[in-house]
Image (cartoon, rainbow, N blue to C red):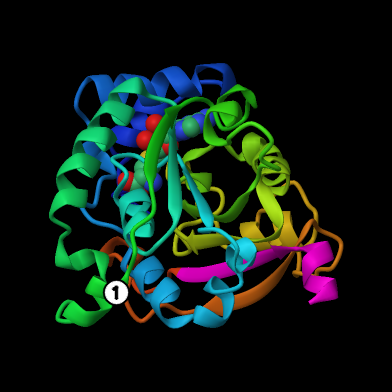
Amino acid sequence: MTHPNNQPPGRLITHFANRDRQSQKVCWSELWDSDQADLWDRGMPSPALVDFITTRRDIIDCLGGGRRRPRALVPGCGRGYDVVMLALHGFDAVGLEVSQTAVNAARAYAEAELSDPSAYNFADENDEKGRATCQPGTVSFVCGDFFQRDWETGCFAPGDDGGFDLIYDYTFLCALLPEMRKDWAQRMQELVRPTGVLVCLEFPLYKDLKADGPPWGLQGVHWNLLAEGGDGRIDGSAAATDGGRGPFTRVAYIKPPRSYEMGRGTDMLSVWAPQEWAQNA
Ligand SMILES: C[S@@+](CC[C@H](N)C(=O)[O-])C[C@H]1O[C@@H](n2cnc3c(N)ncnc32)[C@H](O)[C@@H]1O
């Protein structure tokens, strides 16, 4: 996603111009089917997420209750870099994609990467000991629409109580029309386990909230949706409140030392716990 402010619309924005909510899935699939994933594909997992799960063991070690491997979901996972990385760090990781072509590409990537993991999956590229001690979890990719529930059955064994211990959003919320944001928050509320966390790499924060997307500018949008219980369709004119009325509580807000270059040094990593869990912790 390479459309900075004040420049002519890029290929991605042009592709989505005047396309309504109903046609969004088709639009993404068209891009995958015509081999245009280069518009957003960074070729590696998020360095900010790698660092987070390596350094914030206070949060990560609580996930899954210690009785089973924690379960992670990456909606709109693209080629699945973050899914594979999470599995290499001990999660049973599921990638969700609306495009079957993307799922096929992710499965091919995972097969190659799991047999010979790249150094970029780990915080310290020279940390051979850290890598050797990490017991990998499973990887699976599911083709489905995040806003529907039918794909969920493929993720859980019968009798399983469902839900994910960690959901990671990077360039998924910003790929959605602003009118879909409230539903995104509602689905996150349904999918994160009561003791789980939603981790968001907030991007793009440098982009005008009124400028066309995707990517759509998200400065203040996560807070509005998750802490304030708003619809996320803000224009930056109103001051943010202290939160407390939304479905989640922000339990960590980190300026990641490493992130993608395209974030221009403005990306933030936010970690959200469902209200009830945060209150009882
Ligand atoms: C901007 S791309 C980001 C991909 C990946 N996160 C990455 O960073 O490479 C957004 C992805 O979300 C997928 N997507 C869009 N709408 C979706 C939906 N409703 N359900 C599942 N995936 C969706 C698209 O196919 C696309 O691959």
In the image, is residue 198 above or below residue 258? above
Image side of residue 243 versus residue 133, left or right: right
The residue stretch that appears in magenta: 268-281
Instruction: Kindly tell me whether residue 11 is visible in this rendering.
Output: yes
Q: Mark 1 is on which residue type?
A: Thr
Q: Quadrant of residue 197?
A: bottom right
Instruction: Kindly tell me whether residue 220 is visible in this rendering.
Output: no
Q: Is residue 248 magenta?
A: no
Along the line of sight, the residue nearer the viewer: 128 or 200: 128
Name the image quarter holding the C terminus. bottom right
Residue 40 position, x and y percent, is 29, 44
Image side of residue 21 versus residue 237, left or right: left
Residue corresponding to mark 1: 133
Along the line of sight, the residue nearer the viewer: 144 or 280: 280
Q: Residues within 10 Å of mark 1 (few under 14, many from 20)?
A: few
Q: Quadrant of residue 242?
A: bottom right
Along the line of sight, the residue nearer the viewer: 96 or 64: 64
Residue 51 position, x and y percent, is 37, 75
Q: Secondary structure at mark 1?
A: helix
Picture residue at 58% right of the left edge, 75% below the top: 59
Along the line of sight, the residue nearer the viewer: 13 or 94: 94
In the image, is residue 48 above or below residue 229? below
In the image, is residue 149 above or below residue 269? above
Residue 15 position, x and y percent, is 35, 26
Q: Is residue 275 magenta?
A: yes
Picture residue at 64% right of the left edge, 66% below the top: 65
Mark count = 1
